[in-house]
Image (cartoon, rainbow, N blue to C red):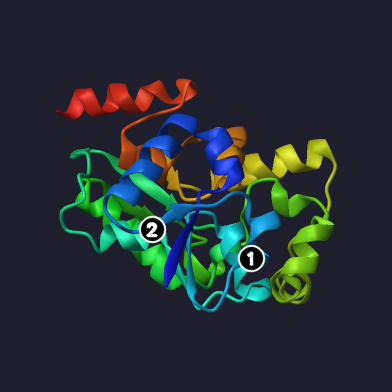
Amino acid sequence: MVRKLFPGCKVKATYPEASEWLAQKILERGYADEIVGCCRTDHQTLTPNDTAVCICNNCMAMIDEDAANGDMANIWMLIDDDPAFPLPDYSGLRMGIQDCGRAYDRRDVQDAVRSLMTKMGIEVVELPDAREKSIFCGMSFLKDVPEQDACFAPNRYVKEAKERGIFVPKNEDEAQAAMKEHAASIPVDDVVCYCFACDAGLGAGGKNAYNIIELVSGKFSDHKKVMSESRSAVE
């Protein structure tokens, strides 16, 4: 069986340094055998003898419904199951955890992210829309579902979307207001997420948002240098 890593196009673009570091770690530690390209163009090349190793919730959704892979693994679960993985220490920090609406039913992924936060010394604060309650994915749920996404994952992005009230278009002012309203419901300033769109949406709402890939790698975007400063302050 070949384990193929889908590193996530938007993840690579949003967190290039952290993404490169993590991909190297994944190969070094034997979580995957090779790195493939974009899930949109390459997921249909998967065979029943392949395992798709994913970081992106959207990749998982489309591979789930439109690929022939024999198995699928999530990076955060793999790292959480590896007791020797070198995790940074952020002891003393208290942060919320924003569950992604695209992964509202993936409790194993949700548990792994929380476990990693705890292992890194972070006090986890649960939000009102935790786990299966989440219909948040930044501004991506406030637009029409992309045609390709609907084609590859019709159950999750068409049928379930109608039932859950997501992918309801709003104009720019309405979308900004929705981000601020959501952020206002969160009882802490610093919030961890495992989705680049959630990250952007929380930031637009006024929160200090950090993706779990930044925490695990210790490599932060320029606009998030405050995390490095916070880490230094509690050491």
Q: Which residue was labeled with disc 1?
A: 45
**Does residue 64 appear left or right of residue 115 in this picture?**
right
Q: Residue at x 60, y 48 (%)?
A: 182
Residue neighbourhood size for the residue with mark 1, other residues' Cα within 10 Å, grouped as few (<14), some (14–19), many (≥20): few
Mark 2–mark 1 distance (CA, rounded to whole Å): 16 Å
Percent coordinates x, y for residue 24 in the rendering: 35, 42
Q: Which residue was labeled with disc 2?
A: 32
Q: Give the residue type at disc 1.
A: Thr
Mark nearer the N terminus (2 vs 1): 2
Classify residue 166 by image quadrant. Answer: bottom right
Percent coordinates x, y for residue 223 in the rendering: 49, 22
Quarter of the figure with the N terminus = bottom left
Q: Nearer the viewer, residue 160 or 174?
A: 160
Q: Residue at x 60, y 59 (%)?
A: 59
User: Can you see residue 188?
Assistant: no
Q: Give the residue type at disc 2.
A: Ala
